[in-house]
């Protein structure tokens, strides 16, 4: 069995590395140009956003990075830990990052971009359940989604 399935303590740096790997995977699928791979682009790009947001949450709350819930953990710490290790609800994770939301909103007002609106759309629409969807998307739509995710990642790295 591969050790990629091992449960490990996740650091913010590791989550960002995984995000980049999923973006690279999505880009490979996009470059194929095959509409049959478009759903994979959506799925992987959404996982990248999940990893990026979780990295922010871990950085903001370093006490939640461990694998086990301590008996002394508060309900809030347990909830945050569940968001990192068990949840895929991007909108709920984003709600726990008000400082990030404020920075995005401030930048949008300054340079006319719609980063916060786009991120909220991504977080509100993407779901882990895409992996089960029998519906098919187009590569053009998937490429737009991937570009929005990559722009968010660029913004995160510049701030």
Image (cartoon, rainbow, N blue to C red):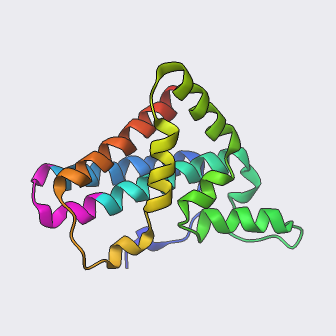
- Where is residue 137 shown, x and y percent of the image? 22, 64
Q: Which residues are magenta?
A: 31-41
- 31 relative to 97 in the view: left or right: left
Residue reaching furthest to the right: 72
Residue in the image at 61% along x and 27% along y: 106
53 versus 5 height, above or below: above
104 versus 140 height, above or below: above
Task: Answer whether residue 70 is visible to the viewer in this image.
Answer: yes
- Where is residue 48 shown, x and y percent of the image? 42, 53
Quadrant where the N terminus sits is bottom left
Residue in the image at 18% along x and 51% along y: 140
Residue 62 belongs to magenta span: no
The part of the image, by quadrant, that contains residue 91 is: bottom right
Residue 40 belongs to magenta span: yes
111 versus 26 height, above or below: above
Residue in the image at 25% along x and 54% along y: 142
- 63 relative to 88 in the view: left or right: right
The part of the image, by quadrant, that contains residue 136 is: bottom left
User: Number of labelled discs?
Assistant: 0
Residue reaching furthest to the top: 110
- 66 relative to 87 in the view: left or right: right
- Where is residue 146 shown, x and y percent of the image? 31, 48
Quadrant where the C terminus sits is top right
- Where is residue 127 shown, x and y percent of the image? 44, 67
Residue in the image at 47% along x and 31% along y: 155
Q: Nearer the viewer, residue 61 or 117?
A: 117
Q: Main secondary structure of the magenta part?
A: helix
Task: Answer whether residue 18 is visible to the viewer in this image.
Answer: no
């Amino acid at each position: 069995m591969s050790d990629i399935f091992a449960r490990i303590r996740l650091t913010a740096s590791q989550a960002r590395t995984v995000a980049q790997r999923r973006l690279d995977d999505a880009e490979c699928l996009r470059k194929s140009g095959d509409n049959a791979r478009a759903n994979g682009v959506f799925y992987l790009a959404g996982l990248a956003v999940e990893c990026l947001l979780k990295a922010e949450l871990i950085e903001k709350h370093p006490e939640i990075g461990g694998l086990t819930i301590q008996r002394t953990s508060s309900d809030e710490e347990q909830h945050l830990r569940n968001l990192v290790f068990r949840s895929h609800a991007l909108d709920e994770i984003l709600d726990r990052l008000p400082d990030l939301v404020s920075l995005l909103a401030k930048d949008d007002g300054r340079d006319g971009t719609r980063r916060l609106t786009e991120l909220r759309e991504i977080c509100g629409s993407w779901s882990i359940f895409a992996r089960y969807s029998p519906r098919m998307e187009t590569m053009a739509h998937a490429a737009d989604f991937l570009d929005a995710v990559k722009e968010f990642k660029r913004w995160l790295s510049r701030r």
